[in-house]
Amino acid sequence: TNINSTFIDGLPAESTVKINYMLEAKKMGDAQQFKKAIELYNKAFQETPEKVVILQDIAVCYYHLDNPQIAINYLKKIENNPSLNDGKTEYLLSGCYFKLKDKTNACNYLNIAFNKKYPNTEQLLNQFCK
């Protein structure tokens, strides 16, 4: 083995490749591998705890794993975060509460998402909350 292929600038070759946990987690989520995605999102969040949007992604995974209560726990942590003000958190909370058959909370959160102009909320409000 050539020493240059083992060491690049004095570092072992494998340490020059940094895993992009967000990207890998998204790939796992897209492949319906939600448990693996959660592991990777957790690693991403440990590296960059300021990226609270990761908690939204974790919540979506738990929702797909039919664990809406765990998803709610994650979403509640970021519910009033100023960097997430597009209505998506409330929209996701609404979906979780619908899954739990809690129409009151579901419609309350759907209304908040609608007021924040989150897409496709008006139709859902008219369909499920009137």
Image (tube, helix red, strand yellow):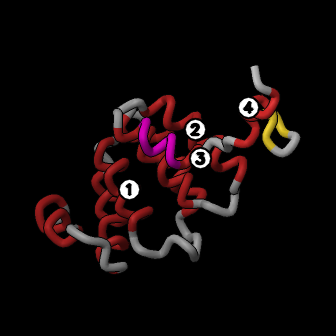
Mark 2: amino acid: Leu
Mark 1: amino acid: Leu
Question: Label 4 vs label 1: CA separation?
Answer: 47 Å
Which residue is denoted by mark 1 in the rendering?
Answer: 92
Which residue is denoted by mark 4 in the rendering?
Answer: 5
Question: Label 2 vs label 3: CA separation?
Answer: 9 Å
Question: Label 1 vs label 2: CA separation?
Answer: 20 Å
Q: Position of residue 8 (x, y in %)?
A: 79, 41
Which residue is denoted by mark 2 in the rendering?
Answer: 40
Q: How many marks?
A: 4
The tag earlier along the polypeptide, 3 or 4, is 4
The quadrant holding residue 123 is bottom left
Mark 4: amino acid: Ser
The quadrant holding residue 124 is bottom left
SS class, disc 2 = helix
Q: In which quadrant of the rendered image does the N terminus lie?
A: top right
Which residue is denoted by mark 3 in the rendering?
Answer: 20
Q: Give the magenta part as a residue range.
A: 23-28
The tag earlier along the polypeptide, 4 or 1, is 4
State the predominant SS element of the stretch in magenta: helix
SS class, disc 1 = helix
Question: Label 3 vs label 4: CA separation?
Answer: 23 Å
The tag earlier along the polypeptide, 2 or 3, is 3
